[in-house]
Image (cartoon, rainbow, N blue to C red):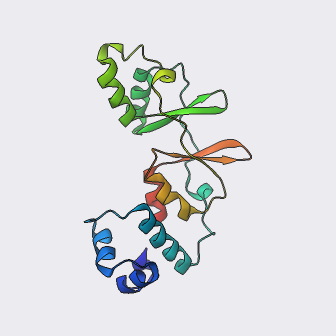
Amino acid sequence: MRQKIGITQKNLAMMTGVSTSMINQIESGRSQPSYETARKIFDSLSQLEGKSSSHTAGDFCSKDIVKLKPTNTLHDAIKKMHQLSISQIPVFSNSDVVGVVSEEGIIKHLADIGEAELKKAKLSDTMDAVPPIVDFDTPANVLVPLIRYTKCILVSKKSKIVGIITASDTLKMME
């Protein structure tokens, strides 16, 4: 994004109060920035690009949400994830989101319950907490730091869930 805008690492470092060396390490993948540093960098780049409010969560979310019910089993979740090559699925009771099931969560539960119980274990007993929900018009630059701490982000419009954003969707924003 920095190169696309056409500024140097040194200029970005001065704008954000981060060392040029740190910018270089982050860009090369040798270092992971703290939440605060990442936010400063993304805010600065968004301001430079002049698009801090032009792209929103609604622009990047996947509108086809794969859903499961609390009564589905872990086996159902694994099968659907494998079929669709996805790593998390929100769990809905009617139109209300009640949790999320993820590959990471399933692996944790497998260690606790054992493979034999896989077909019986209900998502209501094993799902993780409800993921963050942002408004359709939330600026895109807010999403990248948020996705670092969660499996997915749900997008709502007029109190209805209309999309989902995953880590791979945030990579689209970088393009």
Direction from residue 85 to residue 139 in the image, left or right: right
Q: Position of residue 31 (x, y in %)?
A: 28, 65
- Work out which residue is located at the far left of the displayed protein and give it: 30
Q: Nearer the viewer, residue 106 or 4?
A: 106
- Work out which residue is located at the far right of the displayed protein and give it: 158
In this rendering, the answer to whether 33 lies above or below 63 is below
Total residue callouts:
0
Quarter the C terminus occupies? bottom left
| Residue 22 in view, yes or no | yes
Residue at image location 47% in from the left, 48% down from the top? 166
Residue at image location 72% in from the left, 43% down from the top? 159
Q: Position of residue 66 (x, y in %)?
A: 53, 35
Q: Nearer the viewer, residue 133 or 55?
A: 133
Direction from residue 148 to residue 26 in the image, left or right: left
Q: Position of residue 98 (x, y in %)?
A: 58, 31
Q: Nearer the viewer, residue 98 or 169?
A: 98
Q: Position of residue 67 (x, y in %)?
A: 55, 32
| Residue 175 in view, yes or no | no
Quarter the N terminus occupies? bottom left
Direction from residue 126 to residue 47 in the image, left or right: right
Residue at image location 45% in from the left, 65% down from the top? 36
In this rendering, the answer to whether 174 lies above or below 87 is below
Residue at image location 55% in from the left, 48% down from the top? 62
In this rendering, the answer to whether 156 lies above or below 44 is above
